[in-house]
Image (cartoon, helix red, strand yellow):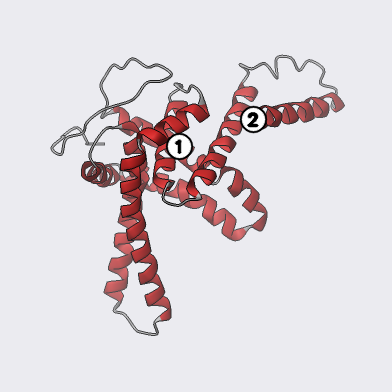
Amino acid sequence: MFYMDFHALVIYNLIYSLANFGVTDVGKFFDMDSPFMRVLNRVGDLMIMNFLMILCCIPVITAGAAFTAMHYVLLKIVRGEEGYLIKGFFKSFKQNFRQATTIWLLMLLVILVYVGDSLIFNYSGLTFPKPLVIAVVAVAVLLAMAAVYVFPLQARFENTVKNTLKNAMILAFVNLPKTLLMVGCYVLPLVIAYFSNYALLFVFLFGISAPAYAAAWIYSGIFKKLEPETEKVTDDMDFSLRIDEGNQEIDG
């Protein structure tokens, strides 16, 4: 209901504005296949996805399954294979819940350790050797680079927790420029929110889904090198591929 009301409200306001400027032939402009309407539909999809992510991340423990489900849907959208957005989201959420939650809890543990380290470095009053501080920061950066691949891999491929984490690290290094670009996509909303309070609304509406959507455009090409050459695609298709530990095809 919200989805349809959002589109209807935007279309009404645009028609009114165009009429004021003397634009009367707006039929083609608002045709469902027009570039404008495709962009508008995509904006609505990202808003809904962002709302679902916020809702499903509130319990914290479910965040891993939520991120996996989001990437499952966004990759399909990027590749033009999208079906029912909400149905696809919760389908992946349910199917990947156990393993995605295990991965998320491991990542959460690492995050808490680094938060603790940061508090110690800044508020303990102790002086730590610069090489130690640099090493801790460097490891944190490396882990962040690998993290941008973890849930997309979980959403797209069938694998063990160990191999999913391992393959995420491999892909992060092999595709370093693209990895840095993906990290930048996720950091940008935080930078915008830090420098502008007025941008908080944008971050609330698109702060999770928009960076993930941009990242999906980047890692889609990377994943295609690991996928079978031909696949039959349906609306309810389950993607499945096992990446063995010795897979030599992960060469970016």
Residue marked by disc 1:
70
Quarter location, residue 166: top left
Q: Is residue 194 above or below residue 119?
A: above
> What crowding class fits label 2: few (fewer than 14 Cα within 10 Å), some (14-19), or many (20 or more)?
few
Query: Which residue is painted at 32% across and 33% down in the image?
Result: 222
Residue 30 is situated, as x and y percent measured from the top left of the image, at 70, 19
For image coordinates 49% across by 27% down, the residue present is 87
Which residue occupies 26% across, 47% down? 169
Q: CA distance from mark 1 to mark 2?
A: 17 Å
- Give the labeled residue for mark 2: 3
The answer to whether residue 73 of the structure is visible from this angle is: no
Q: Secondary structure at mark 1?
A: helix
Pointer 1 local density, CA inside 10 Å: few below 14, some 14–19, many at least 20: many
Residue 188, numbered circle: none
22 sits to left or right of 242: right
The quadrant of the image that shows the N terminus is top right
Instruction: From the viewer's perspective, tell me whether residue 45 is left or right of residue 218.
Output: right
Q: Horizontal and vertical percent for residue 31?
A: 67, 16
In depth, the one of 89 and 250 nearer the eye is: 89
